[in-house]
Image: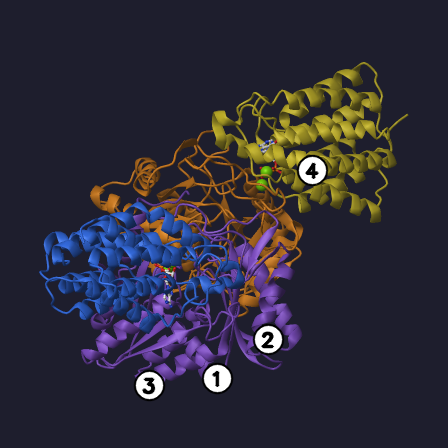
Chain colours: A yellow, B blue, C purple, D orange
Amino acid sequence: MGCTATDVIGALRAGAAAVSAHRDELIQLDRVIGDADHGENMDRGFRAVVSKLDTAVPETPGAVLKQVATTLISTVGGASGPLYGTAFLRAAAAVGDALELDGPAVAAALQAGLDGVVARGKAVAGDKTMVDALIPAVDAAKAAAADGAGPARVLAVAAEAAKSGAEATEPLVARKGRASYLGERSAGHVDPGARSTALLLSAFVESRSV
Amino acid sequence: MGCTATDVIGALRAGAAAVSAHRDELIQLDRVIGDADHGENMDRGFRAVVSKLDTAVPETPGAVLKQVATTLISTVGGASGPLYGTAFLRAAAAVGDALELDGPAVAAALQAGLDGVVARGKAVAGDKTMVDALIPAVDAAKAAAADGAGPARVLAVAAEAAKSGAEATEPLVARKGRASYLGERSAGHVDPGARSTALLLSAFVESRSV
Amino acid sequence: MKKIINDPATVVGDALRGMAAAHPELLRVRTDPALIVRADAPVAGKVALISGGGSGHEPLHGGFVGAGMLTAAVPGAVFTSPTPDAVQAAISETESGAGALLVVKNYTGDVLNFETAAELAGLEGADVRAVIVDDDVAVKDSTHTAGRRGVGGTVLVEKIVGAAAERGESLERCEAIARRVVGQVRSMGVALTGPTVPHAGEPSFTLSEDEMEIGIGIHGEPGRRRLPMESADGIVAKLLEPILEDLPFAEGDDVLLFTNSMGATPMIELYGAHGIAERLLAERGVRVRRRLVGPYTTSLDMQGMSLTLLKLDEELTELWDDPVRTAALHW
Amino acid sequence: MKKIINDPATVVGDALRGMAAAHPELLRVRTDPALIVRADAPVAGKVALISGGGSGHEPLHGGFVGAGMLTAAVPGAVFTSPTPDAVQAAISETESGAGALLVVKNYTGDVLNFETAAELAGLEGADVRAVIVDDDVAVKDSTHTAGRRGVGGTVLVEKIVGAAAERGESLERCEAIARRVVGQVRSMGVALTGPTVPHAGEPSFTLSEDEMEIGIGIHGEPGRRRLPMESADGIVAKLLEPILEDLPFAEGDDVLLFTNSMGATPMIELYGAHGIAERLLAERGVRVRRRLVGPYTTSLDMQGMSLTLLKLDEELTELWDDPVRTAALHW
Ligand SMILES: Nc1ncnc2c1ncn2[C@@H]1O[C@H](COP(=O)(O)OP(=O)(O)O)[C@@H](O)[C@H]1O
Ligand SMILES: Nc1ncnc2c1ncn2[C@@H]1O[C@H](COP(=O)(O)OP(=O)(O)O)[C@@H](O)[C@H]1O
Ligand SMILES: [Mg+2]
Ligand SMILES: [Mg+2]
Ligand SMILES: [Mg+2]
Ligand SMILES: [Mg+2]
């Protein structure tokens, strides 16, 4: 019932497909309060992730996550590249060389990813960034794992919470990232990075690969 | 019943008012088959003509026409500046230093003006230029003068003929001036210079100054 | 219409004052009549090279005033040739004893006004010649038309003849070189949008999202044909073909390739188009020896571009390479 | 969207190929990762000056690669910071032994990617420093925001520090000079239209005929406020006031005034605006000693402009005057 490297790869492929399907939506969100590239950046990065996975298939979940991290760092650019890259890098470190991840390991990976984003980007809750999707996701994941949930269930509650967290960025005034230049005018729009975080987690769940 | 310097000045002031009132129309005509400046050029020139006449009042019709010519040449620019300028210069030469102009003198002035435009611009009938308004105007003026018409009547028939001549430029394909670059696409639009010629002559008539 | 201006009637004068403030070491201006004159003019013993025409094509011509290029530029109202007295003022303000050469783009108004000025200046004893630039292959050259327009090639004429004048070549030599350049330069342009003339207040023509106008001039006049919008590859090929056929340019020719923005087409697109043109020319065996890429012959805020090809020989290449110190070209 | 491009995905690479073809004597390019490098790099014994950022601001940064300015530029995708490995590649390709200084515009993505690269290069033994440019007074500088953006002032940092590097100044001196310029430079911009990002396909924001956006950046993000459109006099005053108050600039100060087009605003308007700014500064007793006027920090096809004011001292003035040989600045 643990989550293997193959499962993680399946989830990531699903994530890439979701990013691609929502590319234009993410561009639109970023167009309104940013610079209209988030969908393009994420799509470029996850296409690279997939094509890397087509040729190099790491054997542990941690190795997969690390390969994703370095691929994202070297292909996405912008703010989201280093932030997502760091998240995957820290998640990789958190899972070490385990061959299978159980519920608590998945929760710990999410926590490490969040910590990485915060360490690099210095955003706090309510700044209207991807952190606002990650914090509730991590909280929900840890609670479920503590209740004994397996990796699929942990991811499912995390995805659900990330979705609500992303939606809840709509009324916020941005204090980090490009949207912060708009001040009050950033309110009324969902943060693109929070949205892409929620999208990725939902896709991981829906892949049923985990 | 002859036409004095004062009459000519009155006619020119009326012409200037007409150009100003039709400035936007002339710009629009030129926008479609030219470069959108004919109304602006003519208005700039005739405002200068009027302000010159406010300070320097020549005493013969010929002197008035000559002052108009030099003013137009130094303020209008473009193709229409030298062409209208030459027309007035030749008209001035044609009337000499007569103190009053009779019907034949007005017709001769128009003929000289047309000759001047043709000498400079090399356009022939049907090239879709101001010449297409001037030729019928001169023909009508000469016929009326030959019939013994006075200056007012000569101008009236000239204006009428110029109006028809200008309207008749609509279907033509331009072979001179900027509109010629459009080739077949110049057909279907009235030539701005022919229109301004007709406008000026009508205004001279309506001024009842002549 | 949205423009950063105070009043359509003062646009040219306002720009001249800004130019004078921006480049005191290169040039001085006069506003009535409007003139842009090399700071050190008249330049004793050297031919005065003078150009001009309607405004709205900046940096043509004022941006090319300075050592090694124009001695003076005469800007008319937007898209309107200047008047003869303004040209005469430029001639007398730059009178050096070595004569003056007028570079005139082939438009009825420009030709009439500049030639009148040359005639009048001649009557006053000045030695003044005029050279007409007519490089636009989009227009059929025929005695039944106003002839080909002068477009991007004008910049090349001004640079090369400016270098000759700076070297102290005679008026005859300068005129001969100018005619040689005119004989060997060809251009063609495309528009994606029409320009908006300040006093007209709306675009000179309107294209839908999937249309382009090919064979346009620089005054907002519509072009030869309205065609479906294409990729950069397609557009560049459509500009290059008629140029290559016209002179014609042949395998083994050395050329200068000038890739010009009509104003609002940004450098990221223009460099892309330039790269394509270089590739197509290489495929033909036409050797690009010199290049100029940028917005040098513009049409206000029009989106679009033009290509200009000049056949080079050793002398023209050397004159092109000679130093130039102007607001828009500097080396 | 109408653009002269083949494909939004290839725009940056296509432009690089065109640049390389256009300026073989100045620079060379690489496309994976995308780099624009001085033709003679590495330049032995001289600090490598490297900048970069999202594409779409041309000529920033690639147009400033050459003697006396940047050693390399690292262009990201349109409006997207390049990745650390691209920056690292620029560092190693220009490695001269004298260290490298990175000029980074203050955006979250640029800062994260460039600083990561500096860190990684440092681990490999290179001496790499980064200077963050944050000259845009439209943004409140506060620990609760991403801080001020780097905009037009970046060009001035690159020119002045490039001159210092060309003189052979040490990395420490170059860094100190860069920080001094950053401390003394302020900018503010206005947009009349939004830019259209190729892969987005529609304008980043839309303004009606009677609106302008004041306090905009260079990535199509909306600005501080949407205001009724004004005359050039009004617009220039609205840009200049917050700049003057911010440093503040005072009577008797010597300054460099940089009047910048955002891309589609033509020179005839820009010179007009420049003249107004010079007049307003003269009225305040602020002395304009040097000027730069043109489209040097653009935002694709956006209509609009920005003003940048740099407080000069003797050393900065001399460094500004030093020779420069790049595609976009040359003297
Ligand atoms: N300091 C930060 N901390 C966390 N997330 C951030 C930070 N800055 C930006 N982001 C996230 O990055 C997203 C924007 O990514 P993207 O558009 O790809 O990069 P850029 O802003 O450089 O164009 C934002 O929507 C936000 O969620
Ligand atoms: N060769 C010519 N002969 C006679 N009239 C001409 C000639 N060329 C142009 N015109 C007239 O000039 C008019 C255009 O004037 P205007 O718009 O002021 O100048 P420009 O064409 O230089 O912008 C045309 O409509 C036409 O009537
Ligand atoms: Mg973005
Ligand atoms: Mg016209
Ligand atoms: Mg005109
Ligand atoms: Mg971005």
Q: Position of residue B15 (x, y in %)?
A: 25, 52
The residue identified by callout 4 is A23
State the separation of the CA atoms marked 2 and 1.
23 Å
The residue identified by callout 3 is C172
**Residue A30 can be seen, yes or no:** yes
Pointer 2 and pointer 1 on the same chain: yes
Q: Are marks 1 and 4 in contact (CB under 8 Å)?
A: no
Pointer 2 and pointer 3 on the same chain: yes
Neighbor class of circle 2 (other Cα within 10 Å; few <14, some 14-19, many 20+) is: few
Neighbor class of circle 4 (other Cα within 10 Å; few <14, some 14-19, many 20+) is: many
Disc 2 element? helix
Pointer 3 and pointer 1 on the same chain: yes
Disc 4 element? helix
Pointer 4 and pointer 3 on the same chain: no
Mark sitting earlier along the chain (2/1): 2
Neighbor class of circle 1 (other Cα within 10 Å; few <14, some 14-19, many 20+) is: few
Amino acid type, residue under disc 2 in the picture: Glu
The quarter holding residue C66 reads bottom left
The residue identified by callout 2 is C245
The quarter holding residue D230 reads top left
Q: Which is closer to the viewer, label 3 or label 1?
A: 3
The label number, if any, that marks residue C314 in the structure image: 1
Q: Which is closer to the viewer, label 2 or label 1?
A: 2
Amino acid type, residue under disc 3 in the picture: Glu
The residue sitting at 35% across, 58% down in the picture is: B161
Q: Are marks 4 and 2 in contact (CB under 8 Å)?
A: no
